């Protein structure tokens, strides 16, 4: 198997998480904190969104805290309702903080190659979210990072799909001797904003409504 000596194409796959039932899946508190931070930075009313969910922003939550993964769906439903923006996930991408990810950052930085770093990230993806699966496809001329951001099936989960792809791209581009720069990103969700807006955010060609075989 070769090392990652070519730009990485980031995709989202749709392969389900089979180890747990949906109500057993949890997310790191960092996932929620990143969304709160980005929304606040972009001027969205986080307090109103949380009130709609009957939750409160956990400013004091520690990185060891976990929350039900299904809360993501409730959160995005509330976020769309309060903001009136059906593409709010795309809007907040640039303001998402860099993923800290604790031990995952250490494993990535201590890896002997980019390929080993991505493999380590894939092995520990559950530390971010039990719903997150990362796989590497090296069968083509360009290596592909396949991201299954969530097994939840809902149009509102497009925001998790987009934000997680951006988060992974940003995480892999920082702290590496050879930063990973995607040559393209493909999503299964349908476009809402003009294609140029997605490409401006991700800095590369974007394909939407992609169907996985």
Image: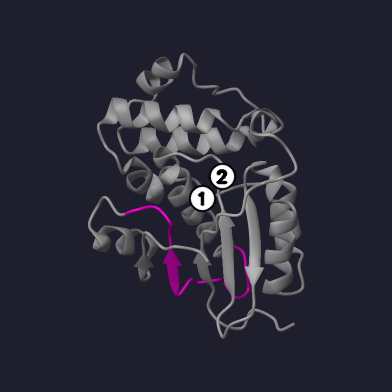
At 54% across and 73% down in the image, what residue appears? 8
In this view, 133 is above or below 54 = below
Q: Are marks 2 and 1 in contact (CB under 8 Å)?
A: yes
Residue toward you, 48 or 147: 147
Query: Looking at the rendering, which quadrant does residue 18 occupy?
Result: top right
Residue toward you, 57 or 159: 159
Helix, strand or loop at label 1? It is helix
Residue at image mark 1: 164
Q: Position of residue 137 (x, y in %)?
A: 63, 72
**Is residue 176 shown left or right of residue 34?**
right
Q: Is residue 92 magenta?
A: no
In this view, 177 is above or below 52 = below
**Is residue 169 shown left or right of residue 1?**
left
At 55% across and 81% down in the image, what residue appears? 142
Q: What stretch of residues is rendered in magenta?
A: 175-190
Which residue is farthest left? 194
In this view, 179 is above or below 74 = below
Residue toward you, 70 or 14: 14
**Is residue 92 shown left or right of residue 182?**
left
Of pointers 2 and 1, the one earlier in the residue sequence: 2
Helix, strand or loop at label 2? It is loop
Residue toward you, 132 or 178: 132
Q: Residues within 10 Å of mark 1 (few under 14, many from 20)?
A: many
Q: Is residue 179 magenta?
A: yes
Query: Looking at the rendering, which quadrant does residue 135 occupy?
Result: bottom right
Label 2 to label 1: alpha-carbon separation: 10 Å
Residue at image mark 2: 150
Q: Position of residue 51 (x, y in %)?
A: 41, 15
């Amino acid at each position: 198997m070769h090392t990652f000596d070519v730009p990485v194409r980031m995709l989202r796959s749709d392969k389900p998480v089979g180890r747990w039932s949906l109500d057993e899946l949890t997310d790191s508190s960092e996932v929620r904190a990143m969304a709160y931070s980005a929304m606040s930075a972009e001027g969205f009313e986080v307090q109103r969104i949380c009130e709609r969910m009957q939750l409160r922003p956990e400013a004091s939550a520690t990185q060891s805290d976990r929350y039900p993964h299904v809360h993501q769906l409730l959160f995005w439903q509330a976020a769309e309702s309060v903001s009136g923006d059906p593409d709010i996930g795309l809007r907040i991408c640039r303001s998402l903080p860099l993923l800290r990810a604790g031990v995952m950052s250490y494993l990535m930085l201590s890896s002997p190659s980019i390929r080993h770093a991505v493999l380590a990230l894939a092995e520990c993806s559950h530390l971010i979210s039990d719903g997150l699966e990362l796989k590497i496809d090296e069968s083509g001329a360009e290596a592909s990072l396949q991201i299954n951001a969530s097994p939840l099936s809902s149009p509102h989960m497009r925001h998790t799909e987009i934000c997680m792809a951006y988060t992974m791209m940003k995480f892999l581009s920082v702290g590496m001797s050879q930063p990973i720069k995607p040559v393209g990103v493909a999503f299964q969700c349908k476009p809402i904003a003009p294609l140029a807006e997605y490409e401006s955010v991700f800095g590369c060609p974007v394909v939407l409504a992609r169907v996985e075989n």
